[in-house]
């Protein structure tokens, strides 16, 4: 997407701090709200090294969404597989995605998703996956609009 309002492009090493800031926003909005054990300090503590490695990997995709020069979102994807339990699957995981609240509904999320799916197709992926918190119904609706369906249910029980 390259309009007067928004630009979405692959992130570069110079964009690491912007990616980390967007991921920090995701952790604060999503992880901290839906998972009492999530560590909201992870992006600031370890994100720069993690995303720098991913940027240099042929199996990773890091997209940055901008309004003017201001970062307003990101998408992180990675190739995975083959899985010995599912040997015919060449997969890609949408690991992390965020659109800043002030631009939600503007098409930024849809363009990030289009870019991710195109990248996956270019890498001969035959299945894409994403995880969303069970209580984040807005994210689930977005992913379902893109054809993602429920395949597993994770159940957890605190022991204390």
Image (cartoon, helix red, strand yellow):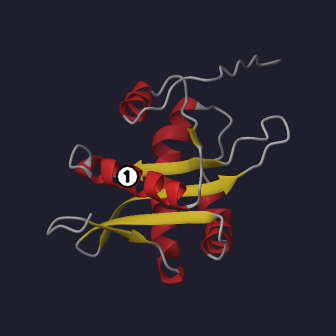
Horizontal side of 86 relative to 137 (left or right) equals: right
- Residue 91, placed above or below residue 58: above
Where does the image place residue 155, in percent across and percent down from the top left? Answer: 71, 18
Describe residue 158's horizontal placement relative to residue 127 as left or right: right
Task: Farthest residue to the left: give it.
Answer: 4
Q: Residue at x 75, y 49 (%)?
A: 81
Q: Quadrant of residue 123?
A: bottom right
The quadrant where residue 10 appears? bottom left
Please state the horizontal and vertical placement of residue 27, each as a whole percent of the image: 53, 47
How many other residues sit within 10 Å of disc 1, few (<14), some (14-19) or many (≥20)? some
Residue drawn at (61%, 68%), measured in percent from left and top? 51
Q: Is the residue 49 above or below the residue 35 in the image?
A: below
Viewer-proximal residue, 20 or 76?
Answer: 76
Pick the quarter of the image with the N terminus: bottom left
Decide: is 143 above or below 114.
above
Is the C terminus in the top left, top right, bottom left or bottom right quadrant? top right
3 versus 104 height, above or below = below
Q: How many discs appear?
A: 1
Please tell me which residue lies in front, 88 or 75. 88
* Residue at (40, 58) in percent of width and height: 115
71 left or right, relative to 36 = left
Q: Position of residue 132 (x, y in %)?
A: 54, 33
Residue at 58%, 36% in the rendered image: 131
Query: Residue extending furthest bottom?
Result: 14
- Residue 52, picture quadrant: bottom right
- Could you say whether the residue bearing mark 1 is in a helix, strand or loop? helix
Instruction: Check disc 1 and report the residue beneath it.
Output: 114
> Residue 89: percent from the left, percent from the top?
70, 42
């Amino acid at each position: 997407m390259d309009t007067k309002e928004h630009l979405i492009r692959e992130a570069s090493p110079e964009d690491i701090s912007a990616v980390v800031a967007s991921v920090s926003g995701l952790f604060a909005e999503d992880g901290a709200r839906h998972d009492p054990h999530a560590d909201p300090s992870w992006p600031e503590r370890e994100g720069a090294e993690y995303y720098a490695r991913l940027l240099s990997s042929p199996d990773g995709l890091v997209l940055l969404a901008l309004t003017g020069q201001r970062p307003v979102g990101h998408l992180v994807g990675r190739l995975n597989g083959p899985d010995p339990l599912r040997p015919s699957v060449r997969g890609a995981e949408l690991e992390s995605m965020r659109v800043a609240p002030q631009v939600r509904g503007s098409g930024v999320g849809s363009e990030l998703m289009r870019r991710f799916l195109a990248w996956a197709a270019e890498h001969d992926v035959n299945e894409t996956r994403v995880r969303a918190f069970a209580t984040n119904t807005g994210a689930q609706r977005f992913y379902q609009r893109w054809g993602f369906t429920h395949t597993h249910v994770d159940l957890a029980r605190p022991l204390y």
